[in-house]
Image (tube, rainbow, N blue to C red):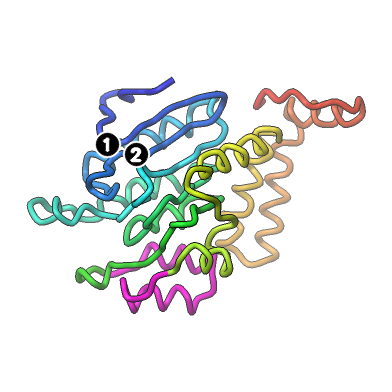
Amino acid sequence: MRLSNIGDVSLVETIYEKRNKIAYITLNREKAANAFNVQMCDEMAAIWTDFNTDDDSWVAIVTGAGERYFCSGVDVKESRTRPMGHIWLPVARIMEQVYKPIITAVNGICCGGGLHFLSDTDIIIGSTNAVFFDSHVNVGLVSGWEPIGLSRRIPLNYVLRMTLQGKNYKIDADEALRIGLVTEIVDPGQLLAKAEEIAHDILQNAPLATRWSKRAIMEGLNHGMRDALELSAYMLKEVWDTEDRAEGARAFEERRKPVWTGR
């Protein structure tokens, strides 16, 4: 099912499709390097809100149209004629509250504000032509949200080099794999298939358990070890009396695949 609009928001710059419990989100401004403008940000806010509340969507895959660019961040040309401000930050705030698994498949260049997707999603894979760099300082902008998020994923010295050297320091696919920025690299033609393979693996697991597990990890990062462990113990209780937890136990005893309902 491909959606053309969500509520009052028409989808012009983004492709949003739902198939077999997977939501496919494609940045669709290939001629503009898949940069996000105000329209795309409005669309993405609506998409993430819809995904988060749709009981039939359990996993999301994000990618960009074409093979040259994944996302180049804010549309600089549009920003010359209209105040863009922090147009992506409201979207990032919404994504912070999405505890369903999100897979990002990076095809080509990912730079500037495009690095938000690396900070705000869960599993990142890349094509062999993926390239990562931070161009904020090259155009006179402060780089803050993205490197702070990336510092939770890769060693700080790489984050600082990306931030301070700007576009003069690029991380290719092999280096991204070596430092843990991505978990896997594949040929461009196999990128979506690999993302779908990961998504199908996730779909075999209890959806509530995966969401609460993600939440325990992400919210635990905001606490010391003892408080984080207590928080995770609380979250364990949240799924203990669910139908899926009981189904998991029955399926294990009966040596069959569980049938999850998300309840």
Q: Position of residue 214 (x, y in %)?
A: 61, 48
Q: Secondary structure at mark 1?
A: loop
Name the residue nearer the viewer: 21 or 175: 175
Q: Is 108 situated above or below 254?
A: below
Q: Position of residue 87 (x, y in %)?
A: 25, 50
Residue at screen point 63% across, 51% down: 216
- How packed mark 2 is, by other alpha carbons closer than 10 Å (few <14, some 14-19, many 20 or more), is some
Magenta region, residue range: 142-170
Q: Secondary structure at mark 2?
A: helix
Residue at screen point 58% across, 43% down: 194
Q: Amino acid at mark 2?
A: Ala
Q: Earlier in the sequence, mark 2 or mark 1?
A: 1
Q: Amino acid at mark 1?
A: Glu
For the C terminus, give its image quadrant. Answer: top right
Instruction: Using the image, tell me which numbered label, if any, was put on residue 128.
Output: none
The answer to whether residue 243 is left or right of residue 66 is right
Determine which residue is flagged by label 1: 13
The answer to whether residue 142 is left or right of residue 215 is left
Residue at screen point 42% across, 77% down: 160
Q: Position of residue 242 (x, y in %)?
A: 73, 29
Quick one: which residue is furthest to the left in this view?
Answer: 81
Name the residue nearer the viewer: 132 or 94: 132
Determine which residue is flagged by label 2: 45
The span from disc 2 to disc 1 (Cα, nearest Å) is 12 Å
Q: Is residue 9 magenta?
A: no
- The mark lying in front, picked from 2 and 1, is 1
